[in-house]
Each structure stands twice: as structure tokens, then as C-alpha cells.
Image (cartoon, coloured by chain):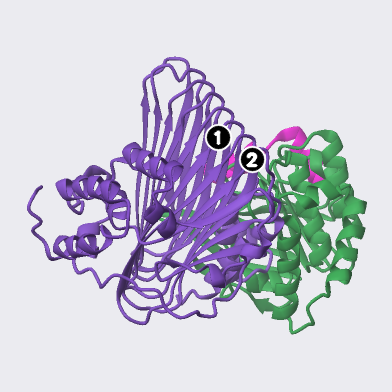
Amino acid sequence: MVKLASEAEAAFSSFYEEMKTKGATGMRSAAWDAFSSKGLPNRRVESWHYTDIKAAMSKPAPLAIGRAGVEAARTHDSIRLIVLDGVFRPELSNLSALPEGVKVQSLRDALAQGTPGVMALIASADVQTDDALLSLNAALMQDGVILRVGGGVTVERPIELASITSSDEAQSSFTRSLVIMGKDARAAVIETASALSAASIQDNQALIVRLAQGASLNLFTHATGQGEALVRVMSLVAHLDEGATLSAYSLIEGAGLLRRQIFARLDGERARVAFNGATLARGRSHADTTLIVDHAKPNGESRERFRNILDEASVGVFQGKIIVRPGAQKTDGVMQSKTVLISDSATMNNKPELEIFADDVQCGHGATCGRLDKDQLFYLTARGIPRKEAESLLIEGFAIEAFDGLENEALRDFVSERVTKWMSGRTA
Amino acid sequence: MLEIKNLHVSVGDRKILQGLTLSVKAGEVAAIMGPNGTGKSTLSYVISGREGYDITEGEVLLAGENILALDPAERAAKGVFLAFQYPVEIPGVATMTFLKAAMNAQRRARGEEELATPDFMKRVKDASAQLGVSQEMLRRPLNSGFSGGEKKRMDILQMALLQPKLGILDETDSGLDIDALRVVSEGVNSLRSPERAFLVITHYQRLLDYIKPDTVHVMAKGRIQRSGGPELALELEKHGYQEYLAEEAA
């Protein structure tokens, strides 16, 4: 094992000593070796070039401990499952509302008992990514929700995986949840990450999605936070079998440093993914969306559409890579990232990439970055709409474009409200 | 209604309007005709308050008030309406949201009550029926995917809803086929009233077959060269603008 030099890595090492007694020893050990051979990525690691996670995590806070129940307002009509300060809390969750064919287990129990299917899944997810933060998550995972939707089961009401930090003191949390869907199962999951305090929280959370043949998942992700001291890494690792569909939308409200990284592997023919979303950032917040869509089999389809709205001195990052493996013929991939900079001090880093090893594919990407369109602004003001209101209309419209095709009306309204609220908080 | 006195406007080092003087009375439809590149669109933008023009001299009065210091939204609330040569598409902004925002912003600026939703809906429904604007168009994002004719009709619909004192039509006929031109012109004609003035900016006589002007002004080299009645438009159609350009050059 490489000697761990930094204060951060020494702290993680002590977390590891604690967590390895909580089951899945072999898996944790492999993940820890994978992490410690790399260490926290610095900016010379290509995939972390624009987000200096090593600096942001230089002083890890103590490991989160479960806390007494808190009142976290409901924002969605959902069956809510709560992970609070790193611990799944069945007694705060709506377990009784779960329909037939849906099973929930805590990750902590699964690891302690060594539930076979779960262990294999967790292990395979990390092999797929080779990401240091995800390895760290696997080595230190404290708890999370394992949600299984049985083959052929359709779940109408969205199931919410709510990750909430409530601590007023600095803490580090490592959680991992799994959504495992059987053949032809259909469900909607809302993933929320929120902080009830402006404490110095370092949160590393992963969501592992496994879709069997013909399964279909609608995923909506909403991340918020408070204050500049928040450091949050959210990883989504999705694995799709033949004919499976993952349709994902996200609303990221920047706070502190937030990295959302998506690793999707289309491992069966005719699998389809769509990742769409808007990021809103202001102040000194840093919001990173990094995504790798890996087409391994023929006739797959991927669509990515992201909108970034950056105000004040915020920094945005979009890194998107579409990989088309040899033999993944007839792949159809389109990736688009558009950014509006509202202030002169905001910065956007765009890095779209295609890696194509098959010859009969259709793939494209586009990335734009600019100010609000002057012609549009003049059009609106010439109709009597004051400039600031006109800017808000345009920015809201720009953000909402990412949610075209989102069928859930309540979620569309939710996005509109949040964007409007965010816009009303503009100071300039 | 509109009084322009000795207006000089530059963009960068380029002088575009050079002492333009024009007067349009309430109830009057004034046509501004002139060759391309003579500053006709600049005039419409300067009246409506677009950024990027340097006004070095002169005044623009609307109902006796100099509006040059006002921003575009304030001018709109005072009654200036510009029907664009090329209305922009604004994907993401719902047409109805936009219409309501515009109407209520103007009402607020004038110290009037905002419209209640049923009242607003009724006004839009009535005006759109008259202009052949379909419910389907109203459901789309503003001007998104509209044909040239649909965009112009949407602009005229806005004019009907906002009831300006001064309507400026900037090359309204460009990009329109005859049928669309007829619909748009009928819309404009229905808005003619003794309390409202129109400035119809056009390169061709054709539009004036549909919107009959009371006065015609020939613009060249950044100012009005000649004014007259509707017969002037016909003369221009026959002889072109050459004499005005040549006189200047001499």
C-alpha cells in the first residue's frame, strides 16, 4: 500500500479502520486499496482537472453519526425514504406506503449480513468507473437504501431517496444507495440531497442503478445546500441491460463545491439513456457535472441536454464523454451543454468528448457559453417588461428547456418554482 | 403624437441619422420609404430605445414628452410599440406567460390595476380570433417554430393587446406572402384610430396597397428628403430612389 501522506488521507484511513469492522470487509479492503493507490485526485488527474477536490477535502471532518429525527419539509408527493446524516432512518420513512413488489433494505444490514446479490452489484459498480471518490465511498460506506423493484412490477408513485444532513457541526458522510429493477419493471425515483445547516459538511454519496432487460426508470435529482463550506460529491452509476431505459432529469442548485458524476453503461442492445438538467450557481459556488456514457452494445441511444446558469463569481464545469465500443453499431448519441453567464466574474469550463470505436454510429455534441441574447432581451423590454424581469424570464426559459419531455407535471412545476425563487434571490 | 426634431444618431464612427425631422399626428398613418441602408430600421430602434445607438443631437417627443432618456420598457408603457422586421424566437418562454407579463408590466408602470386572469384570457381570445392566431400557437413558446407570417401575426396580436399610442411597423412585409400580408394588414387597419399614430417603414410600395398611408416621407442619407401624400409612393415605385441619392451625392 502506498504511504498516505496528507492529513486528509490520514483521516480517511482512520475512518476506514472504523468502517471495516462493519461488514463487507473484503470489498471495503479492495476499494480502500484502489483509493489509496490513487489518493485524492489533484488537478493533474484529467477527470478532476477543473475541480480541485484535493484542496476542498484537505481537512475531513469527523465521520457522521446518526442523529435524532429532524423535521425536513416535504417537497414532493412521494414515498419518502430518509438517509439522515449518513444513516438510513426507516422510522422516519414511509415504508408502509411501499407497494407490493417493492422491497427496501438498509445498506448497513445488507453489508453486515453479506446479502449476496447486493455485494456483487456494489463490487461491479466500482469496477466500471475507476474513480477515486467512488472507491473511497465503497471503502467507507456507512449506510444507504437498497430499493428493489420486482420483475414486471410497475410503481406509480415516485419513491424519494432523500439524503439530508442536519448537523450544525462539521461532518463527513459516505452513503450509498441502490436501485435494482427486475425485468420490465417500471418506477420513478426522486433523489434529493439537501442540507439543513450551513455547517462544513463533506458528503460523498453514490447511487447505483441496475436495470434488467426492459426495465424503465424515471429519475429526478435535486441537489441543494447551504453555505460555502459544503463539499458534496454525488455519483450515479447506472448499468442497463437490453431494452432498458433510464430517463434522468436533474436540478442542481450550487452551494459550496458540488460535483455530480454520472457513469452510465449501456450493456444490452437497444438500451436508452437520457440525462438532462439545469445547474444554477452564484456566489463562490462551484458546480461540476461530469458524465461518461458508455455504449457497449449495438442500437443504443443516449441524449444529454444540460443548461448552466452562472451568476456572480461562480464556476461551472461540464465534462461529457460518449464512448462507443467496438461493435456498438447504430449507436445514436447527442450531447449538448449550454451556459449563460449572468455576471462578468462567472466562469464555465466545458469539455465534451467523443470516443468512437465503431464505424456505423451517429454521435454529436455541442457546447455553447455566452451572455443573454441581446435581441431577445430587447424584444421583451420593448413590450414593456422591465429589464430585470425580462432577464429572469429568459433565464427561467433557458433553464426550463432542459426539462422538455419531463412528463411528471408536479416535477415540472417544482423546477419552475425553484428557478423562479432562485432568480428572485439575485442581488445585482 | 410623434415629433422628431433634428435627430442625429451614430453607431461608432458612422453617422446614420443626420438631422431627421418628422411629425406624425394622432390618427395619422405615415409611411417612411427609402432605399436600403438609409437608416430606416435605426429610426425605429432609436424611437423604441434599443441600446447601441449614440444620439448626438435632437429630440423625440411622444405626446409632447421627450422619451429619449427612457428605457425601452418605460417607452412601451408610454405607448410606443415596435412591430419587428424579424420577431425573435424565445424558446422556453411560454407565449401566454409573456403576454401577461407584458400587459401587466405596462399597467403597473401606468399605475393601473393588473389584469385578473379571466379578463386577460378573454382579451387574448378575442384578439387572437380576429387575427387568426390559433390556440396551438398560443400554447407554444414565444415565436418558436413559427413561420414568418405567424411571427408577424403574433406581433400584431401584441399590438392589439397593448393598445399603443404609436405603432411602428418595421418592414412588416418582409418574409410575407400575399395571404399573410393581407391578414397582417387587416390587423393593423383594424387598430387605426383617431387616438393612435402609425409609422409604416417600408422599402416597397406593395405594403401600402394594403395599409393606406395618409402621408408618405422619402428617407435617404439619414434624413427625410421629401414629404407628400399617397401619390408620392406611386411615384417612387415608378422612378425609384435614384434622384434622392444622386442629389445628395452631387
Sequence-first disc among 2 and 1: 2
Q: Nearer the viewer, residue B199 or A319?
A: A319
Mark linked to residue A185: 2
Q: Which residue is under mark 1?
A: A212
**Which chain is green in the picture?**
B
Quarter holding residue B147: top right
- Residue at figure coordinates x 67%, y 64% from the top left: A77
As drawn, A345 above or below B208: below
Quarter holding residue A291: top left
Q: Give coordinates of residue A29: x percent, y percent.
A: 23, 49
Q: Is residue B13 left or right of residue B174?
A: left
The amino acid type, in three-letter code, at marker 2 is Ala
Q: Give coordinates of residue A320: x percent, y percent.
A: 39, 41
- Residue at figure coordinates x 79%, y 47% from the top left: B137
Q: Nearer the viewer, residue A405 or A364?
A: A405
**Which chain is purple in the picture?**
A
Main SS, magenta region, reads: helix
Mark 2 crowd level (few <14, some 14–19, many ≥20, 10 Å Cα): many
Instruction: Give the CA separation, mark 2 to mark 1.
Output: 8 Å
Chain of the residue under the numbered disc 1 shown in the image? A
Q: Nearer the viewer, residue B244 or A210?
A: A210
As drawn, B213 above or below B20: above
Look at the numbered disc 1 and give the secondary structure of its residue.
loop
Q: Give coordinates of residue B122: x percent, y percent.
A: 90, 65
- Residue at figure coordinates x 41%, y 74% from the top left: A226
- Residue at figure coordinates x 10%, y 56% from the top left: A4
The amino acid type, in three-letter code, at marker 1 is Ala
Residue B191 lies within the magenta run: no
Residue A363 in view, yes or no: yes
Residue B58 in view, yes or no: no
Q: Give coordinates of residue A51: x percent, y percent.
A: 27, 55
**Span shown in magenta:** B231-250
